[in-house]
Amino acid sequence: MSTPTARGGTLPVAPPASMRASVLIRPEHIETQNRPVPVPRSDEVLVRVSAVGVCGSDVHFYRDGHLGDWKASDPLVLGHESGGTIVAVGDATDPGRVGERGSIEPQHPSPSSPETLRGDYNLDPHMRFYAVPGTDGAFREYVTIQSHFAHRIPDSVSDHAAALMEPLSVAIATARKACFSPGARVLIAGSGPIGIALVQVARAFGVTEVIVSDLAPERRQTALRFGAHVVLDPRATPPPEVSTVDAFVDASGADSAVREGITAVRPGGRVVLVGMGLSEMPLPITIIQNRELIVTGVFRYANTWPTAIALVAGGHVDLDAMVTATFGLSEVARALESTADPSTIKAIVEPTRP
């Protein structure tokens, strides 16, 4: 590991030997612990974490102790939406990166898997991903990551926005699958954080009409504030009618939203499932077949960070406006619980705070 140098090139500053980490011990029980600061491997950097976004997957682990097939049977540090400042580098990494601000792409795929070699590294079955059992996340003061997954950000991008490049990347991956393009009409079910990011990405990609459906009136108003053209209450009587759309994206995970959304898609259109809901659900197969709809899912992202950074730096997506509350490292449980409030868009944990 190289000796880091403070920005400005003054005296060497070594990372501390220990750090604070917020650790999930069991469902709804989190402890702040002292742990050794990790040492970066040859191709890694050590990042002092400035901000971490709270994700729905973190909330599932906190409340239930599991997410899908993943079970947090051992203590686990949650948090995978993060950014910070590089303070040390491994032996094979450019020492000039010390002092650089970055956004972390929180995954470590196998470099030789078939998925990685064909460019779909997010689908590597042997992936080590922040805050998935077996790999600690970013609710701590320092993390390591492979150097090429610490993406440099310009000074105009805030620490909060650096962390939220991760959910923005989910939205970008989804938009690419759904073929968002100038002149298109799209329907988005769910206006949580991913739904709101999708609204902004759709507008940035030139989508002509963005329609958002959500049960909560607060979230519908939020969708309008971030650029949706039309918002719908799916429980309205009579039910809202949506004329034919080019693409439907489910960001809710609700089986009823998925079924209804599919019926609104034009022949040859696209359906993209990004919300996490039931592991199985009935689908209108006849409609899918007769209209030759392309139905696919999104699992994380690949090759999205350059686009995410460009959209934010260029003013096309406002991630800072999505932040509704901030918390210190000892307040992670409160941050996770705050997501139950429909007025919450994004809670941020700042590990530099107590």
Image (cartoon, grey):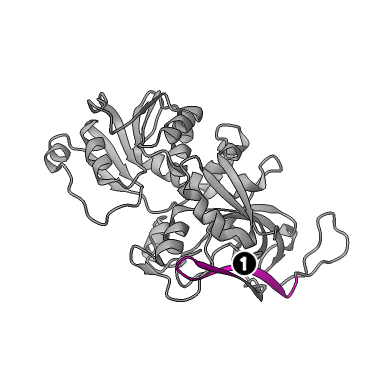
93 left or right of 105 in image? right
Q: Name the residue nearer the viewer: 133 or 254.
A: 254
Label count reads 1
Q: Tell me residue 20's x, y (percent).
A: 66, 69
**Residue 145: % across, % down:** 59, 64
Q: Residue at left 39%, top 43%?
A: 174
The answer to which image quadrant residue 190 occupies is: top left
Q: In the rendered view, would you say 104 is above or below 205?
A: below
Do we see residue 328 in this rendering?
A: yes
* Front in this rendered view, residue 144 or 79: 79
Q: Nearer the viewer, residue 36 or 345?
A: 345
Vertically, is 241 above or below 103? above
Give the percent coordinates (x, y) of residue 228.
43, 27
User: Mark 1 sits on what residue?
Assistant: 44
* Left or right position of 321 against 267: right
Magenta-drawn stretch contains 313? no
Quarter of the image where the N terminus is located: bottom right
Q: Assign the magenta stretch its main secondary structure.
A: strand
| Quarter of the rendering containing residue 60 | bottom left
Residue shown at the point (62%, 49%) measured from the top left: 326
Amino acid type, callout 1: Glu
Q: Which residues are magenta?
A: 16-31
Quadrant (top left, top right, bottom left, bottom right) of the C terminus: bottom right
